[in-house]
Amino acid sequence: MAANDCSDEWETDDNLTKLYDLSLLNHTKTGEYRFVLHTLVRIHAKNLAIESNVYAIAQERHANFFVERLQSDDLENAAIVAEVAADLEDMLLAAEWVRNQQGESAQGRKKRYKFAAKLQPLFEKYGHWQKAITLMARFQTWAEQFQDWSTLARFKLQEARYWSYTGKFERAIEVLQSARTSLHNIESLDMRREREVKLLNVLAGIFQKQGRSEEAIQTFRDEILIEEEIGDSRALAIAYNRLGGLLQQQGKLEEAQQAFERQVAISETLNDQASLSRGLNRLGGLLQQQGKSEEAQQAFERQITISETLNDQSQLSRGLNCLGGLLQQQGKLEEAQQAFKRQVAIAETLNDQASVAIGLNCLGGLLQQQGKLEEAQQAFERRIAISETLNDQASLAIGLNCLGGLLQQQEKLEEAQQAFERRIAISEMLNDQASLAIGLNCLGGLFQQQGKLEEAQ
């Protein structure tokens, strides 16, 4: 309708129906009012359009339609992103047209390069990283021409993120460093700081992916200092959460606890219950790691209460699993069993099979500890079946190892051997040397129990 400048959808439908009746168009499988050209027909039609001097006009109308559409759509809304994504190929065509325009007025170009920023959620959802990199680089030149330094920084930031998604971390860092050196051109101090903290956040994440933990920690700290000055509490809470996780990973548990506690305090001040729930879960895990069981239990129980109030079943499932593990560690086996069973039931309701598998594995281990070996075996076997259905080989290997140990405890030595050998085969296939070592150790112990000392050795 836009490309042909039809007055309404009925006129468009009449034109398309005529072409369809002549077999020049076919319906697609995605909807009644979507059509596709055969490749050769498309080439012929394009050539005719060029000869008739209507191709460029149609391109412009088509591109302008999507430029206008993205101005009005709320692409923070997942449902709208999905709807717009149905036209993704058209969006990319429009973006290419916008990118290639020359000699446009400054106002026209400015309107169109903002179109690239609107495409961001679609690029990220569907992984068109190389196309995104090309477009972002092109639109940066336009932003420089307009001396729109804030938008230039934004495009550089996006380009760096897309490079990181392709695994080109050094290139991403180069782009970020380039962006940082140009921040001084932004006149508004608030905007300059806003761009800088986002840049630091992305840079810290890249350092973390590279295993450059100390640099990542320092970059998060630099970000937090600016966030404190700006007073952006929500961004500050996220930064503290990420910093805490990194510090915990590095074994700096006291510093990690301070970071998580700071995040929790900020979330309480904001009355951001979802953020508070996430923070309490991470704090609880850290406290448990430090052996502070009572404090950890309070954190998990509080998180569970918040998740119930929010009806956040996914976060509730996570909290129950953590609490179950803590209760098991404390020797409160019946309470732990109730927590694990409830978690499994919630995960089943959500049809989150991976979470069901994790819950069943925890439940199986607890039942084994209680001496309820038949129930434990059923839990492990069910977990294995789910892992097979999901084709999650790493999870399958863990499940087989647990089952093998249980069968060995039950004196079902041949079945245990089969489970361990299958686990070893999977570890070899995955080239997971750590898992392979564990499997061989278990199998060796089983052979020793069977009196097969040479094989055990």
Image (cartoon, rainbow, N blue to C red):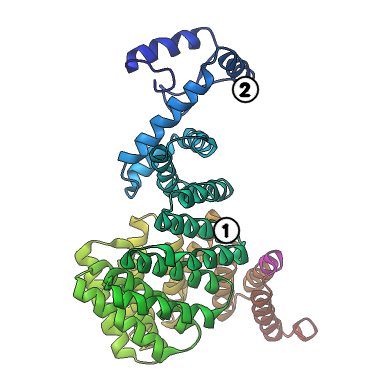
The region drawn magenta spans 425-431
Q: Which of 370/180 is in front?
A: 180
Viewer-side residue, 65 vs 85 = 65
Q: Is residue 313 magenta?
A: no
Residue 91, above or below 306? above
At x 51%, y 85%, the residue is: 250
Horizontal relation, residue 283 to residue 269: left or right = right
Residue behind mark 1: 163
Q: Which residue is mark 2?
A: 39
Q: Which residue is depicted at the point 30% across and 82% down?
A: 262
From the top left corner, tell me how far across and down residue 135 is, in percent.
Answer: 53, 46
Amino acid type of the residue tagged 1 in the rendering: Trp
Instruction: Where is residue 134? Give x, y as percent.
Output: 57, 47
Q: Is residue 360 visible?
A: no
393 w.r.t. 455: above or below: above
Q: Nearer the viewer, mark 1 or mark 2?
A: 1
Assign the C terminus to one quadrant of the image: bottom right
105 sits to left or right of 312: right
Q: Which mark is residue 283?
A: none
The residue under the point 33% across, 64% down is 188
Classify mark 2: residues with Cα within 10 Å, few (<14), some (14-19) or many (20+): few
Q: Is residue 26 above or below residue 374?
A: above
Q: Amino acid at mark 2?
A: Thr
Q: Residue at x 55, y 20 (%)?
A: 37
Residue at mark 1 to residue at mark 2: CA–CA distance: 32 Å
Q: Residue 69: which quarter of the image?
A: top left
Front-lying residue, 48 or 209: 48
Screen quadrant of the N terminus: top left
Does 39 sit left or right of 353 as displayed?
A: right
Mark sitting earlier along the chain (1/2): 2
